[in-house]
Amino acid sequence: MNLLGLLGIHVERGVNLAIRDVISSDPYVIIKMGKQKLKTRVVKKNLNPKWNDDLTLTISDPHTPIHLHVYDKDRFSMDDKMGDAEFDISPFVEAVKMRLQGLPNDTIITRVQPSRQNCLAGESHIVLKNGKVVQKLVLRLRNVECGEVEIQLHWIDIPGSKAL
């Protein structure tokens, strides 16, 4: 396996999530890529949860789609689905490969437009922040009546890995 590096995913918050319990939900996020599966903490009784959880995926193929699933934690039954989204990190990895240095903070490297192929709620910018490439995404959840999840990506180099 050719390890390229680590993808840091900051799962910031959910916005206007669907009600799955009587009046609210206890949402958490699961992120899957290939065989990897990561989970945020559960935020009790909140349709606009702030998770602020940092998750890390190992990346060997940047073309593998990453799936995000939101669930409602239930104590006595199966957790309810609250929608899902998929995102592509290829544009982000391409920006990291450029190895841009010395540019002003918040320089936009790439703009990713919302399309039928992605779950973006709006244009997403890949920017240089404090010398690091970061991308903020607002993902519109599918298979649900409403809801968005805001995440931010950043790259973590692994010493000795096949650098991008």
Image (spheres, rainbow, N blue to C red):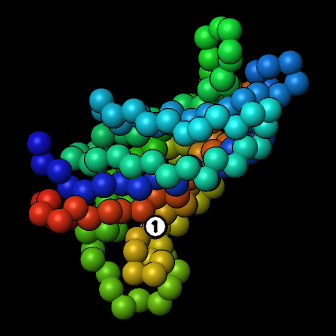
Which residue is drawn at the image coordinates 12% and 48% (left, top)? 2
Q: What amino acid does circle 1 point to?
A: Val
The percent position of residue 160, horizontal first and vertical second, equals 12, 63
Q: Is residue 100 above or below residue 93?
A: below
Q: Is residue 79 above or below residue 149?
A: above
Which residue is drawn at the image coordinates 41% and 89% (left, top)? 103
* Residue at mark 1: 134
Q: Is residue 103 visible?
A: yes
Residue farthest to the right, as pictured = 23
Which residue is drawn at the image coordinates 22% and 61% (left, top)? 158
Q: How many marks?
A: 1
Residue 19 is left or right of residue 135, and the answer is: right
| Quarter of the image that includes the C terminus | bottom left
Q: In this view, does 105 lie above or below 70?
A: below
Residue 79 is left or right of residue 161, and the answer is: right
Q: Circle 1: is it few (<14), some (14-19), or many (20+) Cα within 10 Å?
A: many
The percent position of residue 147, horizontal first and vertical second, equals 71, 38
Which residue is drawn at the image coordinates 50% and 36% (left, top)? 39
Q: Is residue 107 visible?
A: no
The percent position of residue 21, horizontal first and vertical second, equals 80, 19
Residue 138 is left or right of residue 46, and the answer is: left
| Quarter of the image that includes the N terminus | top left
Nearest to the observer: residue 125 or residue 81: 81
Q: Is residue 18 above or below residue 14?
A: above
> Residue 137 lies in what quarter of the image?
bottom right
The percent position of residue 63, horizontal first and vertical second, equals 28, 45
Q: What element carries label 1?
A: strand
> Residue 122 lies in what quarter of the image?
bottom right
